[in-house]
Image (tube, rainbow, N blue to C red):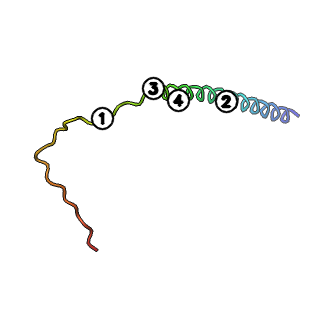
Amino acid sequence: MTFLKIILIAALVFYIFVLIIKWVFRRKMRKLEEQLNQFGQNRQNTPPPKNEAPKNPRVDPNIGEYTDFEEIE
């Protein structure tokens, strides 16, 4: 009879542990989802950065000409 009680108590403790883990995981996921939503809203409100190329890019005179190679079968 004691063995059955031990098994029952272990199963109950395991079940409670699983419920607590699920509850904690759900709370963490909701919090993460809220943070991501706030991050997305902040990104939508800010203008995109300008990625303009410089007006007069410096070209190295030592660079050779572009050669287009064709494949030979």
Q: Residue 26: which numbered mark, if any?
A: 2
Residue placed at 41% from the left, 31% from the top?
48
Using a 10 Å C-alpha cutoff, classify the residue at mark 4 as few (fewer than 14 neighbours), some (14 to 19) or many (20 or more). Answer: few
Q: Secondary structure at mark 4?
A: helix
| Local secondary structure at mark 2 | helix
Question: Is label 3 in contact with label 2 (beta carbons under 8 Å)?
Answer: no
Asked whether the residues under the numbered discs 2 and 1 touch, taking CB atoms below 8 Å apart as contact, a structural biologist would say: no
Marked residue nearer the N-terminal end (3 or 4): 4
What residue lies at 13% left-to-right and 52% top-to-bottom?
Answer: 64
Q: Earlier in the sequence, mark 2 or mark 4?
A: 2
Q: Which residue is mark 3?
A: 46
Label 3 close to label 4 by CB (< 8 Å): no
Q: Tell me, for residue 52, which label it has, or none.
A: 1
Which marked residue is nearer to the observer: mark 3 or mark 2? 3
Spot occupied by residue 3 in the image (x, y as percentages of width and height): 83, 35
Would residue 43 appear left or right of 57 to someone viewing this image?
Answer: right
CB of mark 1 within 8 Å of CB of mark 4? no
- Mark 1 residue element: loop
At which x and y percent is residue 33?
60, 29
Q: Which residue is mark 4?
A: 40
Marks 3 and 1, how far apart at CA: 18 Å
Q: Is residue 70 above or below residue 6?
A: below
* Mark with earlier residue (1, 4): 4
